[in-house]
Image (cartoon, rainbow, N blue to C red):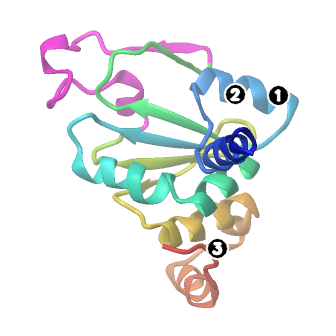
Amino acid sequence: MAFLLTLITTAYASAQEIKWLTLEEAIALQKETPKKIMMDIYTNWCGPCKMLDKNTFQNKEVAAYVNENYYAVKLNGEGNDVVKYKDKSYGNPNYDPSKANSRNSPHELARYFQINAYPTVMFFDEEAEVITPLRGYQTPTQLELYLKMFKNDDHKNIKTQDEFNAYYEAFKPEFQG
């Protein structure tokens, strides 16, 4: 019985965690099974980034929705990983290992995407083309609006601020938190 309880608890816990991939892995998977990509661009020193991880990405409804409908990617916006995107490699030639947990040089891919605030959640379509960046901390219900809007391609029908406001007002969040 204890074994079964451990097995169930382990399965439940893992079901609540987002399956993070590298950008290269996500793009390769898109070729087999098209899905959009959600990329969390964070830094080690960023308090709101840590809140996004703890309060939003560990929310079981957010995690389940992201795992089912997106490929999830994390990118340290000031890290030193080499990342390939659109047949070009991006790194951080000015990265200083002694500043790993404080402000560091921006990653070339973060610069390419014009990231100037952390956290930023980038959304990509099924062809790995950028849809939009979403800057700042998002609660589960705030992020839900964008997760569902982009997944359903509703954003393609929103051309003005008034149309977005109407979409926002009509949206009924289902996630708790």
Q: Check disc 3 and report the residue beneath it.
A: 158
Marks 1 and 3, how far apart at CA: 27 Å
Q: Which mark is residue 27?
A: 2
Marks 1 and 2, how far apart at CA: 7 Å
- 13 or 165, which lies in front? 13
Task: State which quarter of the image contains the N terminus.
Answer: top right
- Numbered range of the magenta stretch: 87-114
Please say whether residue 49 is one of the residues in the magenta stretch. Answer: no
- 97 or 126, which lies in front? 97
Type of the residue with mark 3 = Ile
Q: Is residue 160 above or below residue 162?
A: above
Secondary structure of residue under mark 1:
helix
In the rendered structure, the answer to whether residue 23 lies left or right of residue 177 reads right
Q: Extreme right residue here?
A: 32
**Residue at x 64%, y 78% (from the top left corner):** 174
In the rendered structure, the answer to whether residue 58 lies left or right of residue 35 reads left
**Residue at x 34%, y 58% (from the top left corner):** 136
Secondary structure of residue under mark 3:
loop
In the rendered structure, the answer to whether residue 61 lies left or right of residue 126 reads left
Marks 2 and 3, how far apart at CA: 26 Å
Q: Is residue 94 above or below residue 128?
A: above
Looking at marks 1 and 3 on the same chain, the residue that comes earlier in the sequence is marked by 1
- Looking at the rendered image, the disc whose residue lies closer to the viewer, 2 or 3, is 2
Q: What's the magenta bit mostly, secondary-structure-wise?
A: loop
Q: Check disc 1 and report the residue beneath it.
A: 31
**Residue at x 71%, y 38% (from the top left corner):** 3
Q: Is residue 45 above or below residue 15?
A: above
- 62 or 43, which lies in front? 62
